[in-house]
Image (spheres, rainbow, N blue to C red):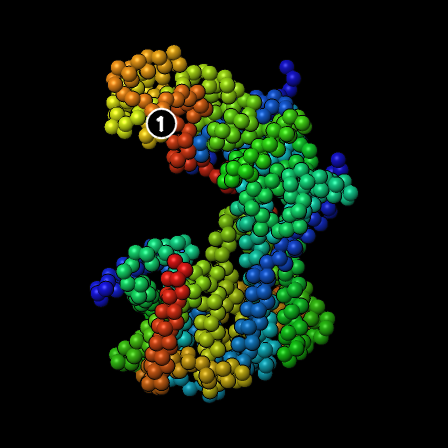
Amino acid sequence: MSEAAIEATDLVREFKKGPRAVDGIDLRVEAGEVYGFLGPNGAGKSTTVHMLTTLLPPTSGTARVAGYDIVKEGPEVRAAIGAALQEAALDPFLTGAEHLKLQTALHGIRGEEGKRRSHELLARVGLTQAADRKVGGYSGGMKRRLDLALALVHEPRILFLDEPTTGLDPQSRSALWDEVQRLASDSGVTVFLTTQYLEEADVLADRIGIIDHGRIVAEGTPEALKAEISRPTLEVIPAEHEELGRTREVLTRFGEPANSSPKGAAVRLSEGEAQLADVVRALDAGDIHVQHLQLHAPSLDDVFLAKTGRSLEGAAEEEAEEPDPSEPVAA
Amino acid sequence: MNRSTLALQVAVLARRSVVRTMRQPAMVIPSLVFPLLLLAINSSGLDSATRLPGFPTDSYLQFALAIPFVQGALFSANSAGTNVANDIESGFLNRLALTPLRRVALMMGQLAGILALGLIQAITFVVIGVAFGSGIAAGVAGALVIVALSLVISLGFGLIGAFVALRTGTGEAVQGVFPLFFAALFLSSMALPRNLIETDWFRTVATWNPVSYMLEAIRSLVITGWDGEALALGFACAGGLALVALLAASSALRTQMLRT
Amino acid sequence: MTGSGFWSVARAVAWRNIHNFFSNPALAVPALLFPMFFFTAFAGGLSRVDQVPGFDYGAGYTTFVYGFVLLQASTFGGIFTGFSIARDFESGFSRRLLMAAPRHGGIIGGYWLAALTRAVFTVTVITVVALIAGLEIHGSGVDLVGLYALALLVNTAAMLFGTGIAMRLRTMQAAPAMQMPAFLLLFLAPVWVPYDLLTGWVQTTASVNPITLMLEAGRGFLAGDPTKVLPAFGVAALLASVTVLWARGGLRSAERAA
């Protein structure tokens, strides 16, 4: 078996206060893969990333990134990876160009080579025009793009992106997705991406690991995970609003209630699409006039719900328990 | 790919530290204006104190000229601490940690920013002091020694600010420490020579306070000329503070930059 | 619109501000710490200054310094209330206040009540500490009433000045604009020595500085030798009146922007 780009065995991280942030994670990411790490706030995503990028030593367990041990071979790991972490991590008083100059110099890329690399990266992320402006005046999207450019300065084989599009407008998000897809397909870079957005994981990731309370609860391709659940949701909007209650009653005979728009009722069909005909017959028998009927394929939220008993979107509103992985911990 | 040498790392980080400090006029200008304003007010407001028997000079300006150098250092502490705290809070320190950067280079780069601000302050205060009529008894050489001592004092306080930021990770803690520095300055021979401080407990505190010796060393160059003992004590206190602060800050950096 | 609208708004605003002040050490502690510190540093470090030829204050240097520190605490207490107004604007809370309150003047009334309450607390603590440290009060009960009434009048003027700035700028960036004038007024005055012992440009400035009058009257009350009482109260009342108009103008500015 060829060496994995990222391999973790029973990775654990405890903090002084609170439960284990990461509670025994095993994962394996092949070279060139885009791996999505999906979970709500406080699930342990950032802590895992901090460990894999050598910024935080694990409490126990092992991991190898780019073939190097994250604890014993930290400098080698760092030379092979790039990271754009949760905060954009920029100095508001330096210009974009100055950031790149600093980063290239620290990686030992000097002189003409350093300048060439800086120009190339600025062009790649669309910041050539803004390069001489102080970063304090950049928009959120521009900061994220600069962040990505800085992570790519030394042409890493593996890229860690920790919630790269949180807080971005749809246009900026889309642009960043394009860049990530280009990196993976054209340059063969392995991308380890954490996100709380279902759509992001669905669109970008070759494989997804769903994490909750510090453990991976499901892993696989998006299609495989959804197929495992294979329970579509049926949404019905009755023609008359007064019929909504009866519509709901009819639907609950066929499965558990699901989220729907305010005008309709929805059910997670316990036996799949095959039940559709029975549902229609039941609605007809109840003399309910249907204005709109729609079958939704299972989503990653359904997968999360099936594995954890909670909806990812609901879980995102729970209070985060994950301690700040960048807080210093006494030896 | 070339390895980045320590010298290169220090150079780029030093440049960044200096540039970042100078691009914050809201930090730089008060650190010059405020001490000078207080000097102006005090020299005139407390001039009658020179009539006390045993007062070493008949110009309170000459006596008080030492104070801005230490006050400036307190602003350095604030500036250095705030800059480091911002780096931690923004995640910039993590970005640096992921490069082949050596911690000692980061520390030395930090010092460059502190020294740059300290140099501007020292030169400004010397020039303004002389322009407003305070002679420097030790002459031009004395003025250079004042600048040198002032830089060591700035380093000491600046590193304390950096230590607080590295230890706590927040800018609020740095702001919170500022009053303590203020207290250290006030509970010294700032306003009167130690032998003229009447209140026993105050005189005792001032005698134990290293800031008194820093002030007295500068003062000796302005008023007296070359006083070996005063200079030795002043440099020893400033240097000692800087060394302790450097060790503390380096240790805190090791904890804050926890990379494996 | 009835008078009760004004007071009910004022009470609500005051309660919230006072509650925030006492439940938030980051607010209460500096307000206490700085004056107490200055008192200790000046009374302890500079006490020999009362031996300068011509220093003729009868109640001792500690009391002399207390007179200044009292005024400083009153002034900055008012300014800090201005800070909390600026903070309220920055957080958006003030917009809600302006929309909900039937009488907008009551908002300023509320902050004023809060400022007075905070000042009474601060001054009490500082006075107790000063007494322990050797403060000698030679004045009578009437003198003390005069002294603290003057202090509260100064507190009011400072608070209204801060209010006017805070309501016009509506951001914490306004803090230096509030602090600097107060600082300059306080320190370009006979802080460490009596007016007659000042020299040069500071004496010139002090001669036209209203704070000089307040200081001399306050120190006179403390020494049991009231001096310049009417001019001091006159000027303080004038300052308070002018700053009322200034604060009202600030309120109009805030209303237009809300």
C234 and B69: which is toward the camera: C234
Give percent across and percent down for residue B104: 66, 46
B232 and B45: which is toward the camera: B45
Q: Tell me the quarter of the picture where residue C200 sits.
A: bottom right
Say what secondary structure mark 1 lies in. Answer: loop
Give percent across and percent down for residue C18: 31, 59
Q: Which residue is mark 1?
A: A259
Chain ID for label 1?
A
Question: Label 1 is placed on what type of residue?
Answer: Asn
Which residue shows up at 39% across the image and 67% down it?
Answer: C250
Q: Tell me the quarter of the picture where residue A247 sits.
A: top left
Crowding at mark 1 (Cα within 10 Å: few <14, some 14-19, many 20+): few
Residue C38 visible, this angle? yes
Q: Is residue A231 above or below residue B241?
A: above
Residue C158 visible, this angle? no
| Relative horizontal placement of residue A322, taking residue A75 as reference (left or right) | left
Q: Is residue A287 above or below residue B97?
A: above
| Relative horizontal placement of residue C21, taking residue B21 as reference (left or right) | left
Name the outermost residue toward the right. Answer: A112
Image quarter where the N terminus of chain A lies is top right
| Relative horizontal placement of residue B205, taking residue C89 as reference (left or right) | right
How many numbered marks are there?
A: 1
Which residue shows up at 76% across the image and 40% down it?
Answer: A113
Which residue shows up at 52% across the image and 68% down it?
Answer: B188
Give percent across and percent down for residue B161: 55, 55
Q: Tell me the quarter of the picture where residue B233 sits.
A: bottom right
Give percent across and percent down for residue A10: 51, 23
Which residue shows up at 46% across the image and 87% down it?
Answer: C196
Q: Is residue C219 above or below residue A158?
A: below
